[in-house]
Every structure is written in C-alpha cells, then in structure tokens.
Image (cartoon, rainbow, N blue to C red):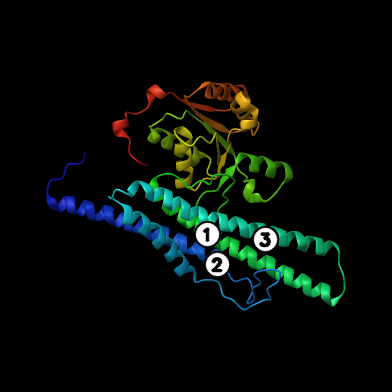
Amino acid sequence: MTKYTNFSDLARTMADTRATQIADETRQDERTLRTYDGAFIEGSEMAKLSIVDGAEKLDMPDPEQAAAAVDLMMRTLFDVFRDTRMEEHAADLAWGFVNSFHMVAKRVEGREDDAAKKLGEMARAYDPSEIYATELEETQLLCQTLEGNREALECMRDHAAEVYRVETGRPFSTTRGSRVSSKLTASMIEGADYLAARAAKRRAEYHPEGPVVAFSGGAQWHDHETLYDRLDQIKRRIPNMVLVTTAQMKGCDAIAAAWAASRGCKIILFRLDRKLGNRAGFVRNERITNLNPVEAIVCEGSGVQLDFARKLRNAGVPLHVFRAAEQRPMAMDRRA
C-alpha cells in the first residue's frame, strides 16, 4: 500500500486519479458519439417504412439525444435500485431493456432481408416498363430505410449493453442467436451461426476474419485476474484475434466473455448441441479444434477440458493450462 507523507500528497494523488477517470469517461463519450453519428446517417431525404406506406420526408433522431436517452435510461435504473432491497433485480430489468433493443433490431433485420430478397429477384427479372421502375425504386428505398433503422437500433443496443457490462461486470448475452455489433462493443456470435456463415460465405459479421484463440474451463472458478492477464498478453501479440469459447454461463467461460466485452474482442460461443447427448462436449471440442486455433487456454474442469487439451496438443496448438489449485486466493479477487 502506498504511504503518503502528508494530506497534500494524498489530495494530489486523489485529484490525479479523478482526472484520469474523467479523461477516460470523456474519451468513451466521444467514441460513443462518433458511433452514433455513423449509425444515424440519413441516406436519403425520403424514407419508406413499409411496402404499403408511401415515401415520406422523415429525419433520423438526433444522435446526441438518442445517446443521452439510452445512457439516462440504463444508468437511472441502476441508480434508483442501488443500496436498496431491490438492487438484485436491477441487472435482470436492465438485461430486458437491452434485449428489447436487440429483438426489435432483429425484427427489422428480417424485414430488411425480405426487401433485399425481393430486390434481387426484381434485378434478375428486368422489365423496361414504368411500373417496374417505380416498384424497383420503392423497394430500394424500403431496403435502405430499414437498413438505416436497424443500424441505429443496433447502435443503441450496443450502447445499452456497454452500460449493462460496466454496471454488472458481465457482458450482455442473448438467450439464443448471435449479437453482431458495431464498433462500440464486441460481437457475440453463436458457433452454429459462425459455422453456417463459414460454409455459405454469408455476411461478414457472422464470420469474422482473424486468428482464432480457443478457450475452455470449468464452471467453478474465481480467479479472473490471472485469466485477464493471460488474455491481455495474447491480445497484445495478436491484436485481431477472435476468441472462441465453450460458452458456459459461469466460471471460466463467463470470465472470458466478460474480458472480450471489456476489450472489444469478437467472441464466438460454441454451446453444446444437446441432440448429441453425452457426446456433445467432445464433438464441440473437435469442432473448435478444426478451426485451427493459433493459441489456446484451457483451465481445469471436467473430462471435457482434458479431452479438449489433448485434442489441441495433438493438433500442435500452443497451449496455456491453468489448474484450479493454482488460483490466486479469493480474498485478492478484484474486478478488472
């Protein structure tokens, strides 16, 4: 512990610390506003919100006001419940707010995909008539409007998710499906979506390019500092890494997901395929190994982790192994 010779030294140190915190918050605010400015772009003076609606001259919401609204909504919820008997419910309610943005964005994405599909069909069946030209123009405008709305909703979702992460110490994760993100936070991609995108060369958001770093560990684990330190070391060497985990909701995998969210690292979650029964964990290990990871971390857990380490070693993957008995004492546990 640092010793201070007088109160002026202590006050100066506290002031420096607070100044650093303010500077960090200011930089984060600036990054957030830049992200909003990029997402709330008006691609056209006109907007078309559905197939049946006519085109209208409608503006996008003000990006600064949208950012302030999300920040106020999320932080107020935590502040109101903090240090009360209802504090434990704040995280669940906040998760619901983030998930609402996510679900609405997914619905808009579905409509956007339908419009894009129709646009592709029309392009393949060209017709020189004026009716065709009008319908093509309206479909293009609908697709463009829905794309802009989706990007704005995803930006607000990612902002809300970041507040959720800061307040709870864990990343927002959907109950199912992927959450591809803008630059504000990391993407969390389901293994099934990743494999499908890889096979079909689908949208880049679902198939991020970059060296794969594999991660797996037991559900009983408290020493997040050691794992954060090692993951930070790897990311310094491999800045564009993509983290692939075995997607348990607690323990090592949850710590890895929290690290990825705090560092803006894309993460792919390989959940168990329950249809495979007792083989599910071992099949998952094989699928991750087949992604040819450039490095891997395995923490002591069950026989599934032993099998994973064995497969990775046989594949020649550089491996970092952590044993449960070597964890730092829980009394030293501090959030990174």
Amino acid of disc 3: Glu
- x then y, percent, for residue 250: 45, 35
Amino acid of disc 1: Cys
- x then y, percent, for residue 89: 38, 48
Q: CA distance from mark 2 to mark 1?
A: 9 Å
Indicate the secondary structure of the residue bearing disc 3: helix
Write the residue at 43% across / 23% down. Answer: 323
Task: Give the quarter of the figure containing the C terminus.
Answer: top left
Marks 2 and 1: CB-CB under 8 Å?
yes
Query: Dot 2 corresponds to which residue?
Result: 40
Q: Give the quadrant of residue 251.
A: top left
Write the residue at 35% across / 54% down. Answer: 78
Q: Residue furthest bottom?
A: 57
- x then y, percent, for residue 300: 47, 24
Q: CA distance from mark 3 to mark 1?
A: 17 Å
- Please say whether residue 30 is visible from this viewpoint: yes
Image height of 288 relative to 188, above or below = above
Q: Residue furthest left?
A: 6
Indicate the secondary structure of the residue bearing disc 1: helix
Q: Give the quadrant of residue 209.
A: top right
Residue 184 vs residue 102, the one in the foreground: 102
Write the residue at 41% across / 30% down. Answer: 221
Indicate the secondary structure of the residue bearing disc 2: loop
Query: Dot 3 corresponds to which residue?
Result: 112
Query: Dot 1 corresponds to which residue?
Result: 155
Write the residue at 69% across / 70% down. Answer: 141
Residue 61 vs residue 232, the one in the foreground: 61
Q: Nearer the viewer, mark 2 or mark 3?
A: 3
- Give me the disc on residue 54: none
- Please say whether residue 233 is visible from this viewpoint: no
First in sequence, mark 2 or 3: give its number.
2
Q: Is residue 325 left or right of residue 276?
A: left
